[in-house]
Image (cartoon, helix red, strand yellow):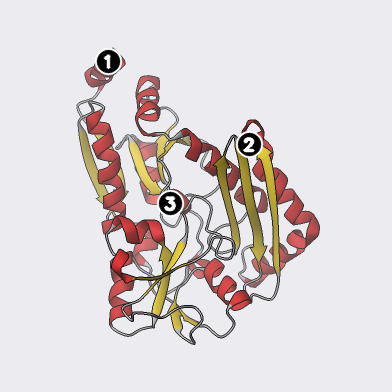
Amino acid sequence: MVLEKIKFMLKKLKIITRSSKLALWQTYFVEKKLQEAGFETEIVGIETRGDKILDRSLAKIGSKGVFTEELEEKLRLGEVHLAVHSAKDLPSALPEDLEIIAFTEREQVNDVLVSFKKGISLQDKILIGTSSTRRIATLKHYYPHIRTTEMRGNLQTRLQKLENGACDAIILAYAGIHRLEYDNLICQHLPTDIFTPAAGQGSIAIEIAKNLDANIKQKLKETLNHWETEVCLHVERDFLHTLQGGCSVPVFVLASLENNFLNIRGGIISPDGSRLLMRELRVSVQEYEQAGQKLAQEILQIGGEQMLKEIKTSYNLL
């Protein structure tokens, strides 16, 4: 009955996305679920500011909304009904007129070392391409013999640079490599207790305007949302929001749900790798709403507040 009412209201559900191959994979994945639920769909692809500026790291261009602002404006204007994002690209605080209606079931969350040179690992003295402040800082802390070089662009662009000899290897999220079937290039799966991922890594987020019809909202959530993932990402995004972290700040967090308990690990690492603050928390799932904030407050109290101030001063983010 709800679906019939929705069909009466709109001809097609319009989905906006970045136009990279990985973003389109994610969007086709979402589209298929919507079509199976009875929706007619149309995909709108655009390039964002983050896709166009490839000569500087996210930390230097300002990462807040760099992959999302243009999509959000289309939502706001009512030109599309939902936006598909990598959850890790979404700022921890959204504009007041927008909301996340669903998180898809999370893919395996870890980072991987990718190379065309078989058999290499982080134990070797290699040059790694990455522009992630989190990954660079982690390498400096745990693997000081590793050198890094700036590496921006979508997955295909970075793989092409790698194949052309710009570096020996690159570090990427397993989810993207696996979804586009480049598993054969994985040389090493990186442990999450060292390379704890960015908040939201491995999940697809569905964003809408708050004024979208309530019947459509209900159907979208029923069709696309994975409750366990939503709980974990709520915790991670609260942690990130409390620390005011983002792609420019080496903040990391991972929540996992097991036997009705949440295990959460989060912290901050200085960009030069010299200082690492990390704490872990285990709470019942019923306590999830405050868990991210609670862990972030612990980090702030043991020196995180001063470290964040120093990092933001160095990147002119204050």
Amino acid identity at mark 2: Tyr
Disc 3 target residue: 202
Left or right of 100 on screen, residue 234:
right
* Residue at image point 28% right, 80% down: 163
Report how far apart the C-alphas of labels 2 and 3 lie in the structure. 20 Å
- In the image, residue 26 sits, relative to residue 307, either above or below, namely above
Q: Nearer the observer, disc 1 or disc 2? A: 2
Left or right of 4 on screen, residue 172:
right
Q: Nearer the observer, disc 1 or disc 3? A: 3
* Residue at image point 62% right, 34% down: 285
Q: Are marks 2 and 3 in contact (CB under 8 Å)?
A: no
* Residue at image point 21% right, 35% down: 41
Farthest top residue in view: 1
Amino acid identity at mark 3: Gly
Circle 3 SS class: loop
Q: Nearer the N terminus, badge 1 or badge 2? A: 1
User: Which quadrant of the figure contains the N terminus?
Assistant: top left
Disc 2 target residue: 288
Per the rendering, the mark at residue 5 is 1
Where, by quadrant of the figure, is residue 136 drawn?
bottom right
Where, by quadrant of the figure, is residue 101 drawn?
top left
Q: Nearer the N terminus, badge 1 or badge 3? A: 1
